[in-house]
Image (spheres, rainbow, N blue to C red):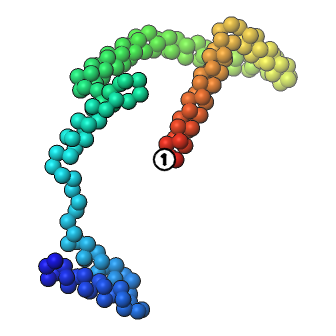
Amino acid sequence: MDDESTRRVRRWMALEKEEGADEAESDHALGALMELVPPPAPPAGFDRRVIRAVRRTTVAGDRRALSHPARTMGRAGVVGIGAVALAYVGIVRLVPLAVSGFIRVLEVLAQGCLWIALSLNAGIDMWTILAAAGRAIGVAAATPQVSGGLVVMAMAGALALYGLQRLLTSEEESSRW
């Protein structure tokens, strides 16, 4: 130990032993002492040795823990091409379908508002209008397209709940370790 570190150790020890000493002053003296301690550093080449060892080990199913960078780049390329293809399909095929669906919804809303206004103008009471609207909704829900859509949405919700349950269960198990 050099003179400076010896002086800082003695000052800190004296502040710790002193009864009724200011805790902040003791903490400051310890901080000054710790400034002299060099930060720990791994030995040279440690990271390369660890990566090499991890690549050599196998995981379940006789697979390598870390694959070769060329494989990773190939996978990234395939995923990128797939993403571009999906974007193309989404833009070229699904956007016009969505636009036409949106226009159809606007037409139906306009017709519904016009029907309600004409019915009220003709003197039909509100309960009759609501009953007719309920019948129209029931008839529409009974079509195969709407029923299929409801089934698909229910299945998607069930799959999402299953995935969430699996995700939360795996987080609980990993937090135990």
Image position of 147 with respect to 21: above or below: above
Q: Residue at x 28, y 75 (%)?
A: 31
In the foreground, 47 or 158: 47
Is residue 118 among what the camera can see?
A: no
- For image coordinates 69% across by 20% down, the residue present is 113
Looking at the rendered structure, the kind of residue marked 1 is Trp
Front-lying residue, 23 or 102: 23
Position of the N terminus, as image quadrant, is: bottom left
Q: Which residue is mark 1?
A: 177
Q: Residue at x 35, y 24 (%)?
A: 63
Residue 123 lies, in percent from the top left, at: 84, 20
Answer above or below: position of 99 versus 1: above
Task: Mark yes or no: residue 117 visible.
Answer: yes
Quarter of the image where one finds residue 49: top left
Q: Is residue 73 left or right of residue 94?
A: left
Looking at this view, name the residue that lies furthest to the bottom.
19
Q: Is residue 100 above or below residue 73?
A: above
Quadrant in the picture for residue 7: bottom left
Q: Is residue 1 left or right of residue 98?
A: left
Residue 160 position, x and y percent, is: 58, 28
Helix, strand or loop status at disc 1: loop
